[in-house]
Amino acid sequence: MERPYILPRIASPDKPLKIAVLISGSGSGLKALLNYQKTPRSHITKLIISDNDDAKGLKYGYEKNINTKSIPLPDVSDKKKQRILHEGLIHIELIKSKIELIVLSGYMRILTPSFVTKWKGRIVNIHPSLLPDFPGANAHRDAINAGVKLSGCTVHLVDSGVDTGMILEQREVEILPEETIQTLQNKIKKIEHELYPRVLDSLSEGLYHSKS
Ligand code: GRF
């Protein structure tokens, strides 16, 4: 049986929730969150982790003097062991920084059920489609190929499936006849950047606690 979601404590700007943001690439979502947090909120980014040394988004953490780490996959040939060791390294950093909520903001790895179980209810993912439609790594391509007229973004809690956890909020965008993967991605990122910092407000202020 899946463990229930255990949501983070209810926080306030005086005692904000300590967030770790996990990224793999350009980090435009991270940049939007850090901008939003310039005003004191009930959440604050205390740790940034990338699984990739070249992730452009790392620079936003360095610029703001936030504890920022690149933790690439360890050099181990057994893939299962490699995943477990990698997540073990991440877990150590999360504990060291007393992290209370993990945000997957363009993090391109799937977390193991064992990691998710430890943090269940305290991992949020941003996915660029209207889940449950088009889960996985090619959401824009899949939405365009399916010929649907609407796509959007979903902010959800992570469970041990792929993009299957409890949906917190969604926003729609129209898919135009001339839409390309790139134009759709740009449009969706724009609404993601508005939506997800606000969902973190709601989560850290306890608005979802009665729903989980
Ligand atoms: C976003 O579209 C998010 O939905 C998906 O990955 C993308 C990350 O973009 N999970 P960026 O790295 O924040 O620019």
Image (tube, grey):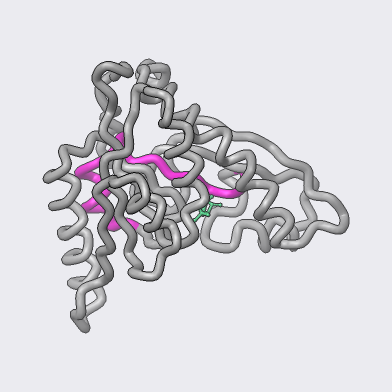
Q: Residue furthest bottom?
A: 77
Write the residue at 77% across / 50% down.
Answer: 148
Closer to us: 138 or 1: 138
Work out which residue is located at the far right of the displayed protein and give it: 177
Q: Is residue 169 left or right of residue 58?
A: right
- Please give left or right for residue 166 compared with residue 186 in the image: left
Q: Is residue 96 magenta?
A: no
Figure check: 154 above or below 186: above
Q: In the rendered view of the protein, which quadrant contains the N terminus? A: top left
Query: Could you tell me residue 48's position as x and y percent?
Result: 31, 50
The location of residue 171, given as percent across then percent down, is: 64, 34
5, 37: nearer the viewer:
37
Front in this rendered view, residue 28 or 198: 28
Q: Is residue 46 visible?
A: yes
Name which quarter of the figure residue 140 lies in. bottom right
Task: Determine whether 174 is above or below 56 in the image.
Answer: above
Q: Residue at x 43, y 57 (%)?
A: 57
Q: Is residue 212 visible in the rendered structure shown here?
A: no
Apparent side of residue 173 relative to residue 135 in the rendered image (left or right): right
Residue 130 horizontal/vertical position (percent): 62, 43
- Residue 126 among those drawn in magenta: yes
- Which residue sits at x=50%, y=38%? 155
Q: Which residues are magenta?
A: 111-130
